[in-house]
């Protein structure tokens, strides 16, 4: 079954101050939509509006045909999961319990995790190869591991969509690629993904749709091939960027940015 | 349930029971173990056979003085620790204590007003209780009105600071206009905290409040942990954060105001006990409310035993909790890797 997030004529901002206007895009099961743009262009504002932390100024956000506002928090948690940037909470928890927090909207008696919840946590950890972290303290693991744990927590929600806020920032090169691999894996498992990133190369790697937001708030939406061209990228970031086609040793073709 | 938690739940009650027994024995009026058992037996028999109590010294010391006082220590210590634990989680900050939103200073001011109005003990306790609720209610209300339910923890902390300042000014004013030979002493002693006025009526009141809070908290032992995340995160996981936060603040304030109203302001318990309990539990959350309650009960009982026994006159509790609490707290602060990590990240 195809599920759909449908953003129609959305204008978002704080109070009366408009940050982005007339946005139109859809994300359905198994698709990856990357949002790319310079700092301060309104990516976070857009996310916060989609997640319901900011009221939309006009336009609509429909999830499977129903307005976002008509979902309760706990209903929404079963459909859309949010992966924030990893930071250290003020209290320490075991990694297993952090992931267990993703289950709270599914708890049978509403207050305590059951056998099934624990089972799903173990499965998710296995799927992301995190089982070795099970009994570690979340405060004591590395930044890359923490980001993976947050993805695991989102998966424990058994969502149809993932919204990821710069999942690769603050990670070393290896961990960035590992996270991106997981993102592609998840889309192959029919989860729809919206993610922000600062790197055009990550968008090429995901090879899905992209939303390129210019400094002057002009939005380009389409497949990465049609949107991320040298001219557009250069204008968006204000530097000379050349997109080149390269062939890897194994014959795969890939695009990348050269500065 | 993790093995560690089972172990804690097994050992802590045993230690508490032993401490209760020692607290019955030690005191100005010397009693040995056999005195205690025979007195218990006598009272038990006369209750069963409907014979009037013989009002021996042992009986009075045990049933009118020591037992209610021990119960009060358990209930107050537990309530303060529980309130501290809740406030720390709600404000995402391990250094928060139950008086952050004005519950203690409000209740203190209420008690001072009660003394000034020459109310009896029960009247004073009632005014203290309601002023405690009023102070925190004011913080919540202003937060709601000004920020339409979107107030962050920082807003609450700053509002708490403001209300605290006003309530403390009220306390100072009460002291200033109080009759220095009578009322002033009463207010001063009230504010330093003491269990010496403990009686069964107070025990019952506190017990009822604690049971009511426990009923409300029953379903929150896991949910409260999600408040440690950012508000946005907790919301997307399916928690109604502002609703949960308000409910928890109300319960914690109820607990704090009730203890201040009966035993005066006892500092530090609500700050260090939840801290020590977390150290003990090391990342686990199961049964955290119960373990925190046991920790607070044990801590205040030990403090009160010291207060009764180390000097020829009783030492006010807040003095002892500060003298013992400060070094413990400093120890935690220096030993806490996480806090120093937080510093590094800034």
Image (cartoon, helix red, strand yellow):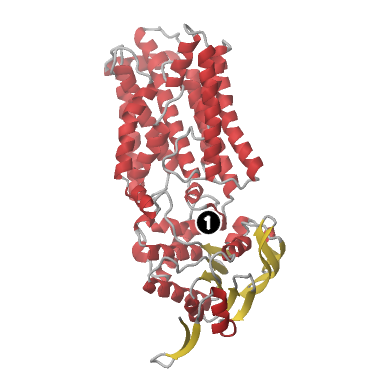
In this picture, residue B234 sits left or right of residue B74? right
Determine if residue A252 is in view. Answer: yes
Spot occupied by residue A193 in the image (x, y as percentages of width and height): 55, 72
x, y (%) of residue B270?
A: 42, 34
Q: Is residue B283 left or right of residue B106?
A: left
Q: Residues within 10 Å of mark 1 (few under 14, many from 20)?
A: some
> Compared to A205, does B25 lie above or below?
above
Please tell me which residue lies in front, A71 or B162.
B162
Residue sitting at x 45%, y 9%: B51
Q: Quadrant of residue A252?
A: bottom left
Q: Which residue is mark 1?
A: B233
Number of marks = 1
Q: Is residue A76 above or below residue B122?
A: below
Q: Which image quadrant is residue B146 in?
A: top right
Q: Position of residue A109 (x, y in %)?
A: 55, 51
Q: Is residue A78 left or right of residue B320?
A: right
Residue sticking out furthest to the bottom:
A251
The subunit letter for the residue under badge 1 reads B
Q: Which of the two residues, B113 or B63, is positioned nearer the viewer here?
A: B113
Please provide percent x and percent y for residue B28.
30, 12
Instruction: Give the structural element (helix, strand or loop) at label 1.
Output: helix
Res B254 seen here: no
Q: Nearer the viewer, residue A145 or B327?
A: B327
Which residue is the extreme one toward the front? A239
Note whether B264 is above or below B152 in the view shown: above
């Amino acid at each position: 079954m195809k599920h759909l997030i449908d953003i129609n004529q959305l204008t978002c901002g704080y109070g009366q101050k408009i940050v982005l206007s007339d946005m139109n895009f859809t994300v359905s099961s198994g698709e990856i939509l990357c949002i790319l743009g310079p700092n301060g262009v309104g990516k976070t504002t857009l996310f916060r509006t989609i997640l319901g932390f900011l009221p939309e100024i006009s336009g609509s956000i429909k999830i499977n045909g129903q307005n976002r506002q008509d979902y309760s928090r706990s209903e929404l948690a079963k459909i859309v999961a949010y992966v924030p940037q990893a930071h250290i909470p003020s209290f320490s928890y075991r990694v297993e319990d952090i992931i267990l927090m993703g289950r709270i909207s599914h708890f049978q008696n509403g207050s305590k995790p059951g056998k099934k919840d624990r089972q799903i946590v173990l499965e998710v950890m296995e799927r992301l190869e995190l089982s070795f972290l099970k009994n570690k303290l979340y405060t004591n693991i590395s930044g890359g591991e923490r980001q993976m744990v947050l993805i695991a927590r989102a998966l424990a929600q058994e969502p149809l969509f993932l919204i990821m806020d710069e999942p690769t920032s603050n990670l070393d090169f290896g961990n960035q690629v590992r996270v991106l691999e997981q993102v592609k894996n998840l889309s192959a498992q029919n989860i729809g993904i919206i993610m922000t990133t600062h790197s055009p190369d990550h968008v090429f790697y995901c090879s899905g749709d992209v939303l390129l937001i210019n400094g002057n708030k002009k939005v380009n939406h389409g497949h990465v091939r049609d949107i991320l061209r040298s001219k557009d990228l250069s204008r968006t970031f204000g530097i000379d960027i050349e997109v080149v086609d390269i062939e890897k040793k194994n014959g795969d073709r890939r695009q990348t940015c050269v500065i | 349930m993790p093995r560690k938690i089972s172990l804690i739940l097994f050992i802590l009650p045993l230690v508490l029971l032993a401490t209760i027994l020692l607290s019955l024995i030690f005191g100005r009026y010397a009693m040995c173990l056999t005195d205690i058992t025979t007195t218990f037996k006598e009272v038990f028999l006369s209750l069963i056979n409907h014979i009037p109590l013989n009002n021996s010294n042992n009986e009075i010391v045990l049933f009118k003085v020591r037992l209610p006082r021990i119960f009060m220590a358990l209930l107050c210590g537990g309530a303060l620790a529980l309130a501290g634990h809740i406030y720390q989680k709600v404000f995402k900050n391990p250094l928060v204590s139950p008086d952050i939103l004005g519950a203690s200073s409000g209740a203190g001011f209420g008690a001072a007003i009660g003394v000034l109005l020459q109310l009896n003990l029960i009247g004073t306790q009632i005014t203290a209780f309601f002023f405690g609720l009023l102070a925190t209610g004011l913080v919540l209300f202003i937060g709601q009105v000004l920020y339409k339910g979107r107030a962050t923890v920082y807003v609450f902390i700053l509002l708490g600071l403001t209300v605290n300042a006003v309530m403390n000014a009220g306390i100072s004013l009460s002291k200033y206009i109080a009759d220095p030979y009578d009322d002033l002493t009463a207010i001063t002693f009230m504010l330093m905290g003491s269990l010496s006025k403990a009686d069964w009526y107070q025990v019952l009141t506190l017990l009822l409040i604690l049971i009511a809070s426990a009923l409300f908290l029953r379903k929150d032992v896991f949910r409260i942990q999600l408040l440690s995340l950012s508000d946005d995160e907790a919301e997307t996981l399916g928690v109604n954060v502002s609703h949960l936060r308000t409910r928890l603040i109300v319960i914690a304030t109820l607990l704090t105001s009730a203890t201040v109203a009966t035993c005066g302001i006892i500092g530090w318990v609500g700050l260090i006990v939840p801290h020590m309990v977390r150290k003990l539990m090391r990342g686990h959350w199961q049964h955290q409310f119960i373990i925190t309650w046991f920790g607070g009960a044990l801590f205040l009982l030990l403090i009160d035993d010291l207060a009764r026994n180390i000097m020829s006159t009783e030492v006010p509790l807040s003095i002892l909790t500060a003298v013992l609490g400060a070094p413990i707290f400093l120890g935690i602060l220096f030993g806490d890797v996480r806090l120093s990590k937080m510093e590094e990240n800034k």
